[in-house]
Amino acid sequence: MSLSYELRVLELDSQTQLLERVQLLTQFAANFVVVRGESGSGKTWLAHRYLETWSHDKNQSLVTCLANQGDEVNRGNILRQLFPQSMYSTTDSLNDSVERILEGEACNIVIVVDDAQHISQALLAELWLLYIASQSVAKQNISVVMFSSSDSLLSRLSRLSHGLEQKPVELEVDELSASESKRFFETMVLRYMDESVEKKLKSAFTNTRPYPGDILALGEQKMEKKVIIRSLVGSPAKIAVTVAVIVLLLFLGYSWLLKSPKPTSDNTIDLQLEQTAIPTLGQSGDDASASQAQKANQDMPGDLEASDDSTSLPPAVTSETASVGVSETGERVVITSDVVDALLDDRTEIAAQKAPEIEQVVEAHKAVEPADTTARLKTAITFSFARDELNALPSNSYTLQIAAMTALEDVQYFLNQHNFDKPVRVYPTLRGEEKWYIVTYDHYPSIQAARDATENLPDDIQSLGPWAKSMSQVQREIARWQE
């Protein structure tokens, strides 16, 4: 995991204490834990953080329940992450599938369920039965941690555990304290916003619930656009005055058109005479026609002499063609993903720490022959973006980020220089006004599988520093390009 990602993580004391309790309940013995919190209290972040940092030694599974998602889909997600190499049927119960796959062998498993308020009663019973069955098998530690925003989940579990010694453990996600809320707001929201909206953000923060989700939502309201639109539109009184002035101008213009004098028949005849071409009389013309033509020529104004109007002609066509990039002398440098992520999130101190590394890369590129640079600039773009394909992947899965660049030619040159045995997907994103192109490698059901895959990559790919990236983050960055 890159250093820039670690610096973007802000762990508060209340959240750390909750994660420590969950770790203690699941580390040495199996437990069925229910973590309840209001919407926006950060349950999803806590679920991911627990798996990434507080349960490294366990075989992990993370499933997010949706309102209209069937039990077979949820069973498949759980079993696919726990046993990616085994055969199973999604129509069988979880306990039957796990018992058949393990055959009494030791295991250390944790199943995390996010948005557990949407789970069906049948799948909830299967998870409870799986937890109970593991109590009777030696060296099997199967824990279930469920994050829910509703109290109904506990009432349903109380009916399942009625009359049994084992009971689910209930934990509560508390509100952030005043100091934690202020620190979270200043670190995660205010530092990334423009100074022109700082005052409005601070005013809105005073009326916001002390939950991480509600505080982060302040930065997603695009208050800069609201300020600009407000300044352009103005107050309702100004709008009414503007509309009245426009209507008055239209009325005056229409009245002027109605009162403008129409050309008389004499004027029309004169205009027609002025525009009539004087014909050349042949030998067969009579004397009357000749005299009329001579008189008409005498009546023509004397200032209609030939003049040179060559200056009004369009400019001469040149044989030289303009080309894009001919004057470009700078060399593009590919840097590692952690430095790019630091620059994307305005973490200049990380970029400063990596300055020696960047300088070495620049010096290495200076030694390359100009022909190599020219070949890179002339590289034909043959790849296409995989936004639809990445958006179709499950948001709780992971991929490996192997490169991030700001030019399409660099991306194509990078793809041409390496051989990949797994699917490589490229997607665009924005940071402020700057375009970035992110190169991802393969697709994995869990973060542990993604981390393990880095050890089997070719040496030239490992040297790029690939790191696991959640598909939900990838999809948010794709949506940022479409805004």
Image (cartoon, rainbow, N blue to C red):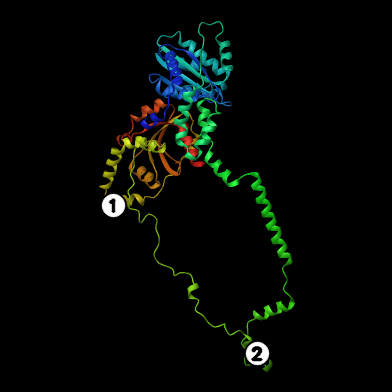
The spot of residue 436 in percent (x, y) is 42, 42
Judging depth in this view, the residue of 466 and 37 nearest the camera is 37
Tell me which numbered mark, 2 or 1, is placed earlier along the sequence.
2
Q: Is residue 194 visible?
A: no
Specify the quadrant of the image occupied by residue 466.
top left
Specify the amino acid type for callout 2: Lys
Which residue is the extreme one toward the bottom?
A: 287
Judging depth in this view, the residue of 407 and 79 nearest the camera is 407
Residue at mark 1: 370
400 in relation to 482, above or below: above
428 in relation to 270, above or below: above
The spot of residue 209 in percent (x, y) is 54, 26
Q: CA distance from mark 2 to mark 1?
A: 78 Å
**Disc number lying in front (2 or 1):** 2
Q: Is residue 276 left or right of residue 451?
A: right
Mark 1 Cα shell of 10 Å, populated few (<14), some (14-19), many (≥20) = few
Q: Is residue 11 visible?
A: yes
The spot of residue 18 in percent (x, y) is 46, 18
Specify the amino acid type for callout 1: Pro
Identify which residue is drawn at 46% across, 31% down: 186
Q: Is residue 7 left or right of residue 392?
A: left
340 in relation to 165, above or below: below
Identify which residue is drawn at 55% across, 44% down: 228
Q: Quadrant of the N terminus?
A: top left
Which secondary structure lies at badge 2? helix
Specify the quadrant of the image occupied by residue 345.
top left
118 in relation to 217, above or below: above
The spot of residue 302 in percent (x, y) is 58, 85
Q: Which mark is residue 295?
A: 2
Judging depth in this view, the residue of 343 and 119 nearest the camera is 343
